[in-house]
Image (cartoon, coloured by chain):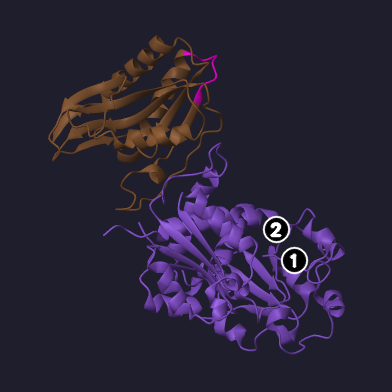
């Protein structure tokens, strides 16, 4: 049993069955992570390189831990300490690494489509760990896994994605995944941070009022304001953003219903999420991080190459 | 199609296996029963039920193990993993692995590897319904055997259970 695609470039390319298979396999890996020896020998003949051309804490550690828990050999690459800084092209860098007999590539890159470009030119299986403002498939998978774990379903689940939708690869991957799995999606945030035609393109609801979104949803996935990708002012100030769109404890307490708060991290405390929400009873943010390892183990396991 | 065990024979065999386990272990205080996913579970469920009627007062440690991630042919073909559920420590315990058919011994090799990850057991035994003799690819033997049969490797043994096939029977094809 395998995924229908050789690479994991985006949720866009996955079928509903693929997503179901990754999530159910992640369940078995989650059990592995509770054992006294949290490790299986499945990938002990596989070497994986983690190419991070853009900064990351959670994703890089999560992938590395997932790889080690599968017994793979791991190589780490950070753009600022490598020859990429001397002007080597992406394809040259990767081909040089692959000539040392590397089987799989996990890559994060600030250019949207970088892993898709690589997939056309190299034989190894590629896992996209985030490309520009395009997709971050393993984040969407771990978000879905966490939602399913907490609420028991994806089909018919009402999910609000709140914040900087335009610059968020997490938002796009989440929309693709949730729509494929039969969930309902509402996007909420300032009009300047929500693409104009996204409602028609994806069949999602859009609101500029977060109270409406919170009242409507079962799960709110709150996104970070990506200041590093915004080259023009799209709202007046962070303080004003917080006043209009920040998630506050009082807002949630007034809803008088169960709600689940998620965030892909890193959190800007006091901007999109207040501390008493991030650390409060509604939040499953740290469960998301825990589940990330199991979900990435599942993806890597299912993409690991066959011997010819 | 040749019948190996009928419904009545399977019932008697399960009873015998449960009695033999008790004969060796006397009580199950320090013993753990582990069924191998997916098909060994049908047999282990029944043996555990039998042991419960024999020892109604005793707590029986019963777990289910999936060996997919430990297979030695994982690089040829990926299989879908089933759930593993062992909600207790196996360290210092006597483990009885339960599976339906012992053939090449490779599944049991994987199971031994997997079980070590749950703690160092005192002892590990193997209980199977069908032992396909003289076809082992690894030095592994069963301690409790329902029926030992001689087969060609081209033949197939089908163990069917009420739960998945409406009838309990073992046939050779």
**Can residue B61 be seen at all in this image of the molecule?**
yes
Magenta region: which residues? B55-61
**Residue B28 on image: x %, y %:** 49, 16
The answer to whether residue B86 is above or below residue A298 is above
Q: Residue at x 28, y 24 (%)?
A: B141
The answer to whether residue A76 is above or below residue A193 is above
For residue A218, which numbered disc appears in the image? none
Chain to which mark 2 belongs: A
The answer to whether residue B107 is above or below residue A137 is above
Q: Quadrant of residue A18?
A: bottom left
Crowd class of label 1 (few under 14; some 14 to 19; many from 20; radius 10 Å) = some
Q: Which of the chains is purple?
A: A
Q: Quadrant of the C terminus of chain B?
A: top left
**Residue B16 on image: x %, y %:** 32, 15
Crowd class of label 2 (few under 14; some 14 to 19; many from 20; radius 10 Å) = many
Q: Which of the chains is brown?
A: B
| Along the viewing direction, whichever of A193 and B125 lies nearer the viewer | B125
Q: Residue at x 47, y 59 (%)?
A: A299
Say whether marks 2 and 1 touch (CB < 8 Å): yes
Measured Cα–Cα span from mark 2 to mark 1: 10 Å
B132 left or right of A121?
Answer: left
Q: Quadrant of residue B71?
A: top left
**Residue A36 on image: x %, y %:** 56, 36
Which of marks 1 and 2 precedes in the sequence?
1
On the image, numbered disc 2 is attached to which residue? A285
On the image, numbered disc 1 is attached to which residue? A267
A25 left or right of A287?
Answer: left
Q: Quadrant of the N terminus of chain B?
A: top left
| Along the viewing direction, whichever of B18 and A58 lies nearer the viewer | A58
| Along the viewing direction, whichever of A240 and B8 lies nearer the viewer | A240
Please identify the dominant SS of the magenta region.
loop
**Residue B167 on image: x %, y %:** 28, 34
């Amino acid at each position: 049993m395998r995924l229908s695609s050789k690479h994991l470039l985006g949720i866009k390319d996955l079928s509903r069955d693929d997503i179901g298979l990754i999530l159910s396999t992640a369940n078995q890996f989650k059990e592995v992570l509770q054992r006294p020896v949290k490790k299986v020998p499945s990938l002990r003949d596989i070497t994986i390189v983690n190419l991070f051309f853009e900064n990351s804490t959670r994703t890089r550690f999560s992938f590395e831990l997932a790889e080690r828990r599968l017994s793979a050999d791991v190589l780490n690459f950070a753009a600022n300490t490598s020859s990429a800084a001397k002007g080597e092209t992406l394809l040259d860098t990767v081909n040089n690494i692959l000539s040392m007999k590397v089987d799989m590539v996990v890559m994060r890159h600030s250019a949207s489509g970088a892993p898709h470009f690589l997939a056309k030119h190299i034989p190894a299986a590629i896992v996209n760990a985030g490309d520009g403002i395009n997709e971050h498939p393993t984040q969407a998978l771990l978000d879905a896994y966490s939602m399913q774990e907490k609420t028991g379903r994806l089909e018919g689940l009402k999910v609000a994605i709140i914040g900087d939708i335009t610059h968020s690869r997490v938002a796009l991957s989440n929309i693709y995944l949730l729509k494929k799995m039969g969930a309902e999606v509402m996007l909420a945030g300032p009009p300047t941070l929500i693409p104009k035609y996204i409602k028609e393109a994806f069949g999602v609801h859009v609101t500029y009022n977060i109270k409406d979104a919170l009242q409507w949803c079962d799960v709110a996935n709150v996104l970070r304001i990506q200041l590093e990708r915004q080259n023009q002012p799209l709202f007046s100030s962070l303080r004003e953003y917080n006043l209009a769109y920040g998630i506050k404890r009082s807002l949630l307490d007034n809803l008088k219903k169960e709600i689940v708060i998620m965030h892909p991290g890193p959190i800007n405390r006091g901007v999109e999420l207040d501390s008493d929400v991030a650390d409060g009873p509604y939040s499953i943010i740290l469960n998301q991080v825990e589940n990330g390892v199991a979900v990435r183990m599942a993806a890597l396991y299912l993409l690991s190459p066959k011997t010819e | 199609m040749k019948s190996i065990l009928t419904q009545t024979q399977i019932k008697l065999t399960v009873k015998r296996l449960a009695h033999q386990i008790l004969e060796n272990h006397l009580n199950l205080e320090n013993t753990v029963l582990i069924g191998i996913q997916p098909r060994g579970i049908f047999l282990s469920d029944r043996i555990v039920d039998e042991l419960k009627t024999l020892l109604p007062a005793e707590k029986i440690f019963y777990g289910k193990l999936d060996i997919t991630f430990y297979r030695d042919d994982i690089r040829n073909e990926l299989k879908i993993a089933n759930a593993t559920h062992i909600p207790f420590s196996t360290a210092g315990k006597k483990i009885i692995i339960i599976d339906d058919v012992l053939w090449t011994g490779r599944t049991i090799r994987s199971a031994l590897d997997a079980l070590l990850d749950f703690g160092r057991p005192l002892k590990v035994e193997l209980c199977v319904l069908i032992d396909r003799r003289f076809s082992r690819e690894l030095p592994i033997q069963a301690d409790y055997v329902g029926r030992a049969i001689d087969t060609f490797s081209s033949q197939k043994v089908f163990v069917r259970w009420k739960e998945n096939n409406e009838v309990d029977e073992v046939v050779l094809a």
